[in-house]
Image (tube, rainbow, N blue to C red):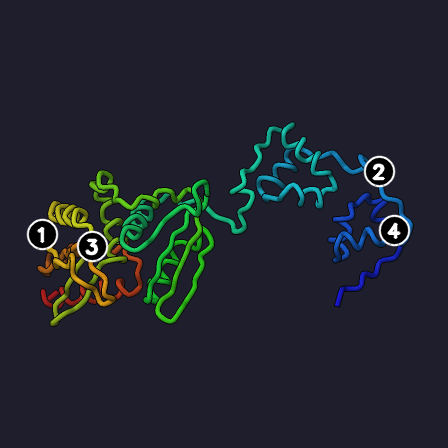
Amino acid sequence: MPKKVDVSSEVLKDMYEKQELTSFQIAEKIGCCQATIWKRLKEFKIKPRLPGVKRVDISKKELSNLYLKKKFSTWKIERKTGIPRSTIHRKLREFKIESRDLATANTIYPKKDFSGNLNEKYYLIGFRIGDLRVRKKYNNSKTICVACGTTIKEQVDLIRGLFEKYGRVWFKKNKEKTNIEAYLNESFNFLLSKSPPIKLLKAEKKFFPFLAGFIDAEGSIGIYNKRARFSLGNYDWKLLFFIHKKLNDYGIKCNKPFSDKRKGKLNNEGYKYNENYWHLRVEQKNYLLKLLNKIKPHIKHEKKIKSLEKAIINIKDRNGI
C-alpha cells in the first residue's frame, strides 16, 4: 500500500518558496517520490519556480568533494544542491575537474589501492600462479577479477582474508565446492600475468614470500611414517627447476624435480592429461627445517601453518632438541 504523504500547504510553501529547496530535496526530506511533491504543489496552487531561479553558486572545493571524493553522479548533485545538471557540467569544465570515465562512474562497490608491501605482493604473485584465475572484467575495465574454486574451507577463508580489505569478495557455494571472486582496482595489475617474474625473484627477500604463496596454493607439508615431509607440485616444470636451483643456492639441498609422466593418460573424468605433472621434494630433515623456518613468516594458509609447526616439532624431536 502506497505511503500516505501528510504535508500541509504552509510547510510545503515554506520549503519550496522560502527555503528554495528543489522538489528532489523536499521529497527526500518528507520520504516520498518527486512526482508526489509536484502533485501536492499543483493541489495547493503553489506556482513552480521559473527556470533559472535555482541555486547556481557552488565552489570548486564543494563540487570536487561531491563529484570526486563522494563520487556523486551529476543527477545526485542536482538533487542535493538544487543546481541544474547543465550548470553542474558547466562548472566541472570551468573548474577543470576531470570527468570520471564510465568504468569509474559505474563503480558500485568501493575499492582500495594495494598496500605496496613487497612481502604481500610477492606472496600474492606466488599464490596467484598456484591457485587463482585473474582477468579484467572486460577489455577496457578498471576492475581486476580474481577467481578460484575450492572444496577446502581454509582456502576460502584465506582468499577472503587476502582480498576483502581491498574490494568486494563474492562467494557461491554448491554441493561440491565454493566459487570465489574478488573485485579489485588496477593497483592489482601485477596479478594479471600468468608467468612468474623470474628475474625479480632472484632476490631472497622476494623469493621466499613468493615461495610461501606458491606453497599455500600447491604445496604439501605433513608427517608421514613419523617423519616430516614437504612436496611441491605443478605443471610448470621450468618454475619448479628454478625453485630447485634457488633452494640449493640458499643451502637447502633437494633433488631435481621429477615427473609422474601422466601426459596422454586419462584422468578420473575420462579426459586426457595435456602435460606431465612435476614434483619437487625436500626430505633431509636439517634442510627441511631450514626451509620451514624461511617460509614460516610468510605462510598464511591456516591448515599449512599448523602442519608447518608440527613438522618443525617433529624434526627437533628427532634431532633431540
- Is residue 17 rendered to the left or right of residue 117? right
The residue beneath circle 4 is 42
Residue under the point 22% across and 38% down = 199
Splitting the image into 4 quarters, where does residue 149 fall?
bottom left
Is residue 173 depicted above or below 293 in this figure?
below
Point out residue 89 in the picture as x, y percentages from the top left corner: 66, 34
* C-alpha separation, residue under disc 3 versus residue under disc 1: 22 Å
Going from N to C along the chain, the mark reached first, 4 or 1, is 4
Point out residue 120 in the picture as x, y percentages from the top left corner: 33, 48
Going from N to C along the chain, the mark reached first, 4 or 3, is 4
Front disc: 2 or 1: 2
- Provide the secondary structure element on which disc 2 rests: loop
Residue under the point 30% across and 60% down = 301
User: Going by the picture, which residue comes out furthest to the right?
Assistant: 45
Estimate how packed mark 2 is, as few (under 14), some (14 to 19) or many (20 or more) residues with alpha carbons within 10 Å.
Answer: few
Front disc: 4 or 1: 4
Point out residue 169 in the picture as x, y percentages from the top left corner: 44, 57
Camera-side residue of 160 and 120: 160
Question: Disc number at residue 50?
Answer: 2
* C-alpha separation, residue under disc 2 versus residue under disc 3: 73 Å
- Is residue 215 rendered to the left or right of residue 149? left
Estimate how packed mark 1 is, as few (under 14), some (14 to 19) or many (20 or more) residues with alpha carbons within 10 Å.
Answer: some
* C-alpha separation, residue under disc 4 versus residue under disc 3: 74 Å
Camera-side residue of 234 and 290: 234
The residue beneath circle 1 is 256
- Provide the secondary structure element on which disc 4 rests: helix
Question: Disc number at residue 274?
Answer: 3
Camera-side residue of 65 and 182: 182
